[in-house]
Image (cartoon, rainbow, N blue to C red):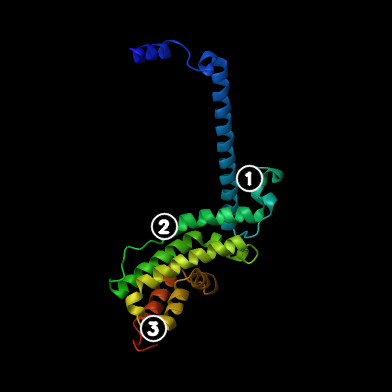
Amino acid sequence: MAAPVTAKLAASEPATPELAMPGVAVSAADSAAESDGRRLRREQNREAVIDALLALFSAGQYQPSAAEIAAGAGLSPRSLFRYFDDVEDLYYAAADRHHRVALPLLQLSVSPQDQVADKIQAVVHSRVRVFERVAPTARALQAGASRNELLAAGLSRVRKVLRGQLSELFAPELAGRAAVMFPAVEVLCSFGSYDRLRRESGLSPEAVTATLVAALTALLNGDPDVS
């Protein structure tokens, strides 16, 4: 009958020093809560700094100062780098947020076996819609990539994902001529082409969409003997 006796003792008497010393237990709990609170505040402040940077990008300030970023986050310039190692680290965090938001929005509901016209419409509408949403940040990150190896590597990974999507989607149309045709398809579907049509040519999103659809249609429905 040892087990029932042991259970009864465990229920009626303190089994550990912490249970025998309530003050110690409360102190440990308070310490853990305080630590969790600090972590939460730190994460909130990090996110506030990223929000401030992205807001400045949206306002057309692609290389804001640390003071401007801190002001937007409601922090002092000195405290800004409690949360980031340096400006490059901050920009990389902003790029990571940007990519996590943008990439899921680029998923398509068409497959390689669908009609080429449907595929072209789907990919162009998807990319123009997303590019409209992320354009300020994309411009800032592309400008910063020339000075920031982490940004450059991140952008390269994103382009690889987008390239793979196009390669898979248009594989039937590109069969036997991908080496010549695919680079043109990729360029037409890129942020660079969208941005040039929007800013330099002054086209509306609808006009950009129509232009890209027409160009891709002409390209992919062209001479099948191109090699």
Q: Residue pushed farthest front?
A: 1
Spot occupied by residue 53 in the image (x, y as percentages of width and height): 60, 52
- The x and y percentages for residue 57 are 58, 57
Report the number of numbered marks. Answer: 3
Residue indicated by mark 3: 177
Instruction: Look at the image and tell me in which quarter the C terminus lies.
Output: bottom left
Residue drawn at the location 35% of the way across and 67% of the way down: 122
Q: CA distance from mark 1 to mark 3?
A: 50 Å
Q: Where is residue 127? Give x, y as percent.
A: 43, 66
Report the amino acid beneath label 1. Answer: Tyr
Residue bearing the label numbered 1: 83
Crowding around mark 3 (Cα neighbors within 10 Å: few <14, some 14 to 19, many 20+) is some
Name which of mark 1 and mark 3 comes first in the sequence. Answer: 1
Residue identified by numbered label 2 = 104
Q: Secondary structure at mark 1?
A: loop
In the displayed structure image, the side of residue 26 where residue 146 appears, left or right: right
